Image (spheres, rainbow, N blue to C red):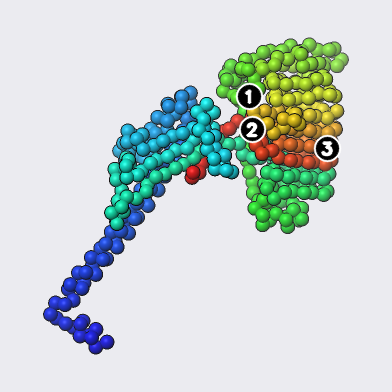
Amino acid sequence: MFSIRKFWFDCQGGLSPSIAIIMMYLITVCGMGANAAFLVTQKMRLEGVADVIALEAMRGIRDTDLGLDGVRSYALESARHAAGEDSIDVNLLRDVTTIQFGQFDQKTMNFVEDDGNPEAVVVTLDFTADTGHPVRRIYYSAAGRFADMSVRRVAQFYTPRCYTSGIVAEGALEFQGSLSMDGEYCLRSNKEIAIKSSWSLGNDGIISAPPNSKLRQSVVNKHEKTGVLAFRHWKMAVSKDYMGIFDALSTGTLEDFNFPFLENNFVITVDIPRIGKRKPWRHAYPYDLHTGRINYINCPYEKDTLVFKKGTYKNLMIVTNCRIDISRYVEFVDMTLITSKGGRDSIEARQGLKLGSKAKACSSNTGTVFMTRGDIDVKRSVSLYGAQLIMYADDSANKGPLPTAVLGGNVNMVGSSIYSGAGLRFTKSVNYVDCPHPVSKGIVKNDYIRMGVF
């Protein structure tokens, strides 16, 4: 202690060199901290640039007619504007940016480059000692070494699970028979989910009901801590394509829609004659319709009913304003049916309803879609294989209380979805099994983009 006091009160200059040495270390540490903070700030900024490039590249594919080279230039220019006009030299940005298109598997984190089917993009900004970067050509750390400023981002089109896998209703969901859902399923209601019999709901799904809604306590007890159950409201925009189809029919712009089972989007008006005046039915057979084409069937009278007779309707699209009746032994495979007829029983299938092929339920580039402005009445079994059954599809018309749609037979679903803009009641058993790659073709398009670090 005495030596420290003696040193402190020494007036012969011994303290100054010590302070100078200490200050050198303090300045170095402060410089390293400031440089590190600068590096972090700049890298965050460059990550933002990469995000913009990835997002705009996917938007360029979806929303423009540009080729892939044009999309690359469009994305780079968008990034330059987002960063600030004078902040980045777009020519230097091109030097350090690689934009690759192809397929991306989110589960395996595997990217396969494929310019012929660009459903994902990987953006790499290579800010290394060799390339420098367009904001400031070289970054140094305080130790005199190059800092790694490389950034990689991935973006891809996707269809949310609830469009393709499970049961969804804006109104109440009611299950009077047993309920079994396995795999990556979705069970959602914006009112309540009433399960009145035995149930089995796996741990890989989504169960969603609004706050303070009624839900069977045993379901809550099992899933409240698994991450499967969520109490919240949600919104699914199913009417965008529904109304868009009818607008496109009148303007001749159906080429904007993607139907993988059609040879082209050419519309053929099909005249199905009335059988009689007392029974205003129009009987249609598979040979009446045009494979690989859009078949438009008009019913000028309010009570006209389009009856699909025995056979398999495949690889086509039907758009109509008719009420629909489905006879026995009718199958619909890889096709889309849309009716603008609203109200109760706009589609009636007293002998059961089968959409899709069991053998091809989980195949790629397939899918059967039924979409109606009203509801569907089925007295017997419902079999959905890689299919989408959509009722009360027109959001703009779903005003006020709507009747509950009722499916009266056993329901068997494989990689399929059922949506109702109103309530939905199942009177018998419901069994759902998912597919590794659920169908997202047909009317429901890849309108969503998700992004991540790759």
> Which quarter shows the N terminus?
bottom left
In the drawing, what numbered circle is on residue 96?
none
Hey, what amino acid is under mark 2?
Answer: Ser
SS for tag 1? loop
Residue 159 falls in which quadrant of the image?
A: top right
Q: Are marks 3 and 1 in contact (CB under 8 Å)?
A: no
| Of the pair 117 and 295, the residue shown nearer to us | 117
Q: Is residue 361 above or below residue 7?
A: above
Residue type at the position of mark 1: Pro
Give coordinates of residue 331: x percent, y percent. Answer: 78, 25
To which residue does mark 1 refer?
260
232 to the left or right of 76: right
Q: Is residue 119 visible?
A: yes
Mark 1 or mark 2: whose residue is earlier in sequence: 1
Q: Position of residue 196 (x, y in %)?
A: 82, 48
In percent of width and height, residue 48 lies at 42, 43
**Can residue 396 be spotted in the picture?**
no
Residue 270, position as x, y percentages in the image = 71, 12
Residue receiving disc 2? 440
* Residue at x 68% of width, y 13% of height: 269
Left/right placement of residue 59 relative to residue 219 reads left
Is residue 304 or residue 379 the one in the foreground?
Answer: 379
